Amino acid sequence: MTKSYIISIDLGGTKILSALIDSNSKITCKEKIPTDVMNGKEGMVAGIVESVKKIMNENELSEREIKAICLGVPGTVNPYSGLISHAPNLGIKNFNIKEALLKYFSIPLLIENDVNLGGLGIKKFEFDKESNNMMVVFVGTGIGGALFFEGKLYRGSTFFAGEIGHMKVNGKGNLLSKDKNSTFESLASRTAIVRDIKRELNKGKKSLLKEYKSPGKMLKSKSLAYAINKGDSLTIKHVNKAAVTIGTVMASLTTLLNLDTIVLGGGVFEAVGDFMLPKVRKAFKKSVLPEPGKALKIYKTKLGDDAALYGGIALVEEFLTK
């Protein structure tokens, strides 16, 4: 029987998003279930197993028809051994997820960092021939990156490459922050934007988002988009500040790496990317050195949440197609 499908899974801190992808690279169905972070490794594994079995059962598929299961993990992971060194959003350290899942399936199992997996999807399906040296940046709860040199994913010496959210971004004067402990994601992620908006709401500033003043009230990217579309000055101020930070940091990375393409994605850019992109480009142009800057283009991904799902196809090609 022909192995016609792959199951691609994006494991997040709040949800497990899974998809069945056919031999024509088409997503034929999706399943979304909450991530069970309360029960640690066991809860996470059980959720992944449930998600895979649900897809197989609903589509009446046997293991013989599945070419591979591809899993994106939000943390540092060895794609060859399946060892998760550290996944802070899942509360997991030094856990071999590949060994754990192979107790339930005899299907080939491929593991990758979630941002790398998203980057693979974007590279293959949006910029396959157009880009040689590229960085994909996802802006959401945190900020993560995926690097491509000479057309190939660069994972680094210990599989940590691309973790740009943890870079220190601080200084005095015209630099981005006077806080010596500031990181890129502590200044420009959705978490940072929401923190700064709530801080001003609690100081009495007016905003359409006043209902999110309470610490327990979650402020998501869609609400930021609503407020921006309504011209809310407080929201515009802080989203604009994040955009300038992103553009400035991208300029420094381009000066270092001489990239030809940067692609921005994640929940924030999916929601307010059209507002942010011109501001990112302007800040980038202001900060980058002319020689590397003239060769680089900045885009927003069109794949949205599906980027990591499509990345499973590229991962299969890398590890299973010789």
Image (cartoon, grey):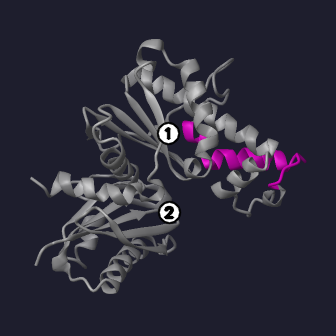
The quarter of the displayed image where residue 20 is located: bottom left
Magenta residues, as a range?
A: 184-209
Q: Which residue is depicted at the point 46% across and 49% down?
A: 302
Element carrying mark 2: loop
Q: Position of residue 133 (x, y in %)?
A: 32, 31
Could you tell which of marks 2 and 1 lies nearer the N-terminus? 2
Q: Which residue is depicted at the point 50% across and 63% down?
A: 13
Q: Position of residue 115 (x, y in %)?
A: 40, 50
User: Is residue 197 magenta-colored?
Assistant: yes
- Residue 13, numbered circle: 2
Which is more toward the observer, 305 or 128?
128
Above-or-below relation of 292 to 191: above
Left or right of 318: which side holds 84?
right
Q: Which residue is depicted at the point 28% across and 71% down?
A: 100
- Circle 1: is it few (<14), some (14-19), or many (20+) Cα within 10 Å? some
Element carrying mark 1: helix
Above-or-below relation of 15 to 155: below
Q: Badge 1 is on which residue?
A: 166
Is residue 83 visible from the viewing direction of this image?
no
